[in-house]
Amino acid sequence: MTKKKSFLDVLSTSTFLHILFSIFLGFLVGALFLVVMGLSVGEAYGRLINSVTSLKGFSYVVVYSVPYIVAGLSVAFSFKTGVFNIGAEGQFVVGSMAAAVVGILCPNIPKPLLIPLCFLAAMAAGALWGIIVGFLKTKWGINEVLSMIMFNWIAFYLSNFIAGIPAIKNEGSAEATKNISANASMLFSKSFIKSAGLCPTANWGILVAIVVMLIVWFIIEKTTLGYELKAVGSNKFAAEYGGINVNRSILTALAISGALAGLAGALQLMGMGSRISIFSSQEGFGFAGIVVALIGVSNPFGVLIAGLFYGALMYGGSKLNLVGAPTQLINVIVGTVVFFIAISVIFKNIFRRRARSPRSIERQAEKEADKK
Amino acid sequence: MKKILAIALVLCMVFALCATSASAADTVKIGMVTDVGGVNDKSFNQTSWEGLQALAAEDPSFEVAYLESKTDADYQTNINTFIDEEYDLIICVGYMLADATREAAEDNPDQLFAIIDDSSCADLPNVACLMFAQEQASYLVGLVAGSVTESKTVGYVQGMVSDSMNLFGIGYITGVLEVCPDATVLQYNANNFGDIAGGSTAAKNMITNGADVIYQAAGGTGIGVINACDEEGIWAIGVDTDQAPLAPDHVITSAMKRVDVASQDISKAVAAGEFAAGVHLYDLSNGGVDLAPTRDHIPAEVLELVEAAKAAIIAGEKTVPTTVADCPAFTLGD
């Protein structure tokens, strides 16, 4: 019995264990679905694990996770500052398109200049997309969630429009932009990839993601700006009373969050895709950022790990078809994980109440007596 | 807690038990990579996959699998997955995969590929390009449209402007004008293969302007066109597969591309060791394109006309134009 109590105790106090438990439940529900569909759980999950544990597989996971991590940081930053950046999707799209335009139209700029230039263009575009929404919110009080969802679609069609402009559009039959200049590409050299046995799209985007993570952590935890943004996020009336300019804080938070989502778009483009296709449906990197931020409980380091986890699911999940299991299984797992994390408040309260019930206090006392 | 532990242990055991199932040495593994339309696109991804499934069902020595692409960047990953898994043939569905296929084929000269609807990789020694004479099938449905229209106004919705896509419009318009020289052909480029709502709006505009038959070559956008025709009670013409099930009362026929047959043919060729690179053309003469089996709504005399035209094309007495220059009435070309 003492074991049970301590498990619940730990679960209610440790966020990390709580998330692990949610992930475990996610896989359990996924397994149930597999059983109902008459498929082998071992084969499907075995394939999932096998495909991400080899060196090549792991390099795929890292490459896949970079945009998810940075988009996750964008959303996590917004959560910390009390706005809900559901517009990361649109900011991601305009960011990657801005980077693509720079990467396509300026092929002659040397690599050390062009890559930062693409990053800057992407961040500026993403920040602009965030600021417009922030302006609508602070000036006229328009709910940012509504305007962001609409701005996601404006970004979507704007990107398709730009991709169709003759100077940008692919000369071949592909429904996509031209490939960005080799000077804007973050890929490792082909010979290095071959000799190291990495995946063909191996790139150094993960380093950028880690640096961005550190910067976000620093801004939130170590600067006055971060303190102000967090204060506004916690209680904007108290913050105002404390002399913080609330509207400016909201704009700043949305601009930074938007810049991060835009950067995520650039990283995806310059690391993996090399071009942007004419979308027929939203690619969902920004929405995935929300999931990653939730799993990472908005903690920058947590987001890094959650992004890798999400990337692993996305890459490993794409191979489920090979054993006859539907790739949608991944969505079931992710959905369940997010569900259990999202209801964590209820979860924790139940466990905490039990942990604090008179009987458990008694048990706690007994345990301490035993120790003595 | 005990229960949870027990479940965890069971799961661990299951993982431990799972071993990679070794496939028999003489199986032929065929992998298919979809474009972003996905495997249930009611169009050529779905048709190819159904063809492969049918092949595996009748001949167990074929092992087939597909990987879906969600974004442009997934093409390369999916192709590489099949390469790593040592598949004998990788079928890339659609010209959107042309660049990824070329790159993978150049990097892996021993791997066999087939690509549907693209001839840009025809110079590679390990890629078979499965091409369809879509202008011939479109010409036949054009004859049908020109014959059944009463308002002398027909519509055409295209998914994207490209040389390959334009063939649909050129064939169709040539057919319409041949039987009804003073017909007006309303044309619209949706610039999107996945916009059902946009297709529906375009079709309704055409109907408002008098169209009573609409042909579409626009993937998911085309489904919107068919829906609108069904609602407004006019004829729609399907594309790629027999699309009659989408609106049984209002799809008069469809211009079929037997992508399933092509996928089966190339798979069988690989199994027999007779893989041939370069362009494989599927046209009326080898049944690669044709009018769909659903023809009940077509008047008998029109069907006769169509059959006669088909015979003439097969016999080489008639050719359907393939360039914008030969079909000035086609206005989406540039």
Image (cartoon, coloured by chain):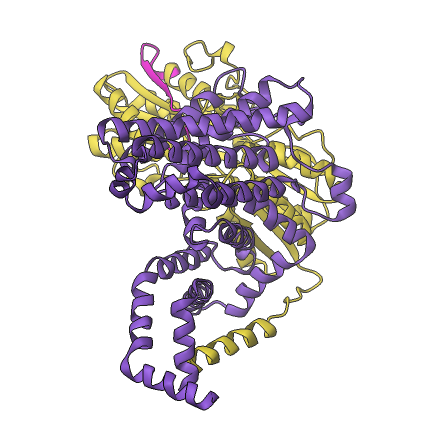
Chain colours: A purple, B yellow
Judging depth in this view, the residue of B23 and A223 nearest the camera is A223
Residue A249 image point, x, y percent: 35, 34
Residue B117 picture location, percent across and down: 55, 32
Q: Magenta stretch: give its range.
A: B178-196
Q: In the rendered view, does A223 fall on the left or right side of A349?
A: right
Could you tell me which residue is drawn at 27 percent across and 31 percent down?
A: A137
**Image quarter hosting the N terminus of chain B:** bottom left
Q: Residue furthest front?
A: A242
Q: Is residue B246 visible?
A: yes
Q: Residue at x 73, y 43 (%)?
A: A193
Q: Nearer the viewer, residue A74 or B151?
A: A74
Q: In the depicted view, which residue is nearer to us: B297 or A361? A: A361
Q: Quadrant of residue B144?
A: top left
Estimate the x, y position of residue B28 in percent, counting from the top left.
66, 55
Q: Residue at x 66, y 64 (%)?
A: B23
Please state if B254 lies on the left or on the right of B277 as rendered: left
Q: Magenta stretch: residue B305 in it?
A: no
Q: Is residue B327 above or below residue A140?
A: above
What number of labels is visible? Answer: 0
Residue B310 in sight here: no
**Residue A286 position in % (x across, y down):** 43, 40
Is B312 left, or right, of A112 in this rendering? Answer: left
- Dividing the picture into quadrants, the one containing residue A236 is top left
Q: Residue at position x 31%, y 27% from top?
A: A135
Quadrant location of residue B303?
top left
| Residue B186 falls inside the magenta stretch | yes
**Is residue A173 left or right of B26 when viewed as pictured?**
left
Of the pair A160 and A262, the residue shown nearer to us: A262
A155 shown above or below A7: above
